[in-house]
Amino acid sequence: MKNILPFLTRLPIGGDFEKAREELWAFPPIALVSSAFPVLFLYLRLPLANLLAILGLYFTIGLLHLDGLADWADGIMVKGDREKKVRVMKDVNTGIAGLFAVAMVLFLQVYSLPLVPFYSIYLAELNSKFAMLLGLATKRPLGRGLGAYFMEGMNRRQLAVGTFLYALLYLPVALYTPPAVIGLVGLLFGIYVIKLSLSNFGGVNGDCLGAMAEITRAGTLLVLAFVWWYL
């Protein structure tokens, strides 16, 4: 797990690049690390805890996924054929679609957190990391970047172990608070991003994975917010 951590967090841990793709199964457990600061801030009910939680989240994981979301949204929204969409997604400039997507994801997270239990950000991160694992499991690389490199190491064993760990990590919360099971619906957001990526770009790259992570997390918090508001 230590070899994949540097790719998904900003923790100053040295990892072996060659061994990182052998630890794709560890995507779900990384949610324990990435959600630690946010859960603590929310549990302590600090002033502006929802804002501090989001800042703590991105302090831990960095802004790479947000950048990927912006590029992905630009590519999805532009009109044209597949080649044009891929070209726009890979453009270093960020368009209005990318800015809107990032703003919406941030707003949804910040404003959902006051409505949900403190551990919801953990469930959202768990879904986020598992959605990325599902994206890698498509084995449909776009280009020869980091996403393609990880896909080369993806296999049924890694997916099976990752799925088992995801269920194992979700189960205690679901048993403690049965309504939390509805958070599983948040995975549908990630699956939809995978579908859009394949249909619009013909494959999945790092930007697509970033979009899966961000949209799944925000979508999970939104679903949980509606459930707890209803309860």
Image (cartoon, rainbow, N blue to C red):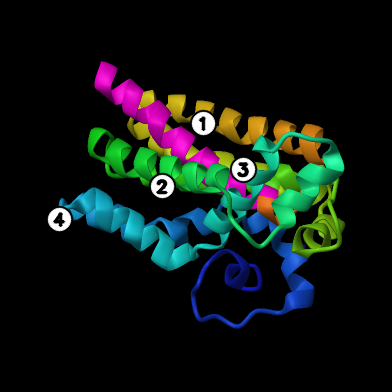
Q: Are marks 3 and 2 in contact (CB under 8 Å)?
A: no
On residue 133, the disc is: none
Q: Which residue is mark 2?
A: 122
Mark 1: which amino acid? Answer: Gly
- Secondary structure, mark 1, is helix
Residue 29 rendering spot, x and y as whole percentages: 54, 55
Judged from this view, the residue extending furthest toward the left is 47
Residue 53 rendering spot, x and y as whole percentages: 30, 55
- Secondary structure, mark 4, is loop
On residue 46, the disc is: 4
Q: Is residue 47 left or right of residue 111?
A: left
Task: Give the alpha-carbon distance from disc 4 to disc 2, as whole Å.
Answer: 17 Å
Q: Does residue 127 belong to the magenta stretch?
A: no
Task: Give the alpha-carbon distance from disc 3 to disc 4, as whole Å.
Answer: 34 Å
Looking at marks 3 and 4 on the same chain, the residue that comes earlier in the sequence is marked by 4
On residue 73, the disc is: 3
Q: Nearer the viewer, mark 1 or mark 2?
A: 1
Q: Residues within 10 Å of mark 1 (few under 14, many from 20)?
A: many
Q: Residues within 10 Å of mark 2 (few under 14, many from 20)?
A: many
Depth order, front residue of 143/230: 143
Looking at marks 4 and 2 on the same chain, the residue that comes earlier in the sequence is marked by 4
Depth order, front residue of 59/96: 96
On residue 186, the disc is: 1
Looking at marks 3 and 2 on the same chain, the residue that comes earlier in the sequence is marked by 3
Residue 215 rendering spot, x and y as whole percentages: 53, 40
Q: Are marks 4 and 1 in contact (CB under 8 Å)?
A: no
Looking at marks 3 and 1 on the same chain, the residue that comes earlier in the sequence is marked by 3
Q: Nearer the viewer, mark 4 or mark 2?
A: 4
Mark 2: which amino acid? Answer: Tyr
Magenta stretch, residue numbers? 208-231
* Residue positioned 26% across, 22% down in the render: 229
Q: Nearer the viewer, mark 3 or mark 2?
A: 3
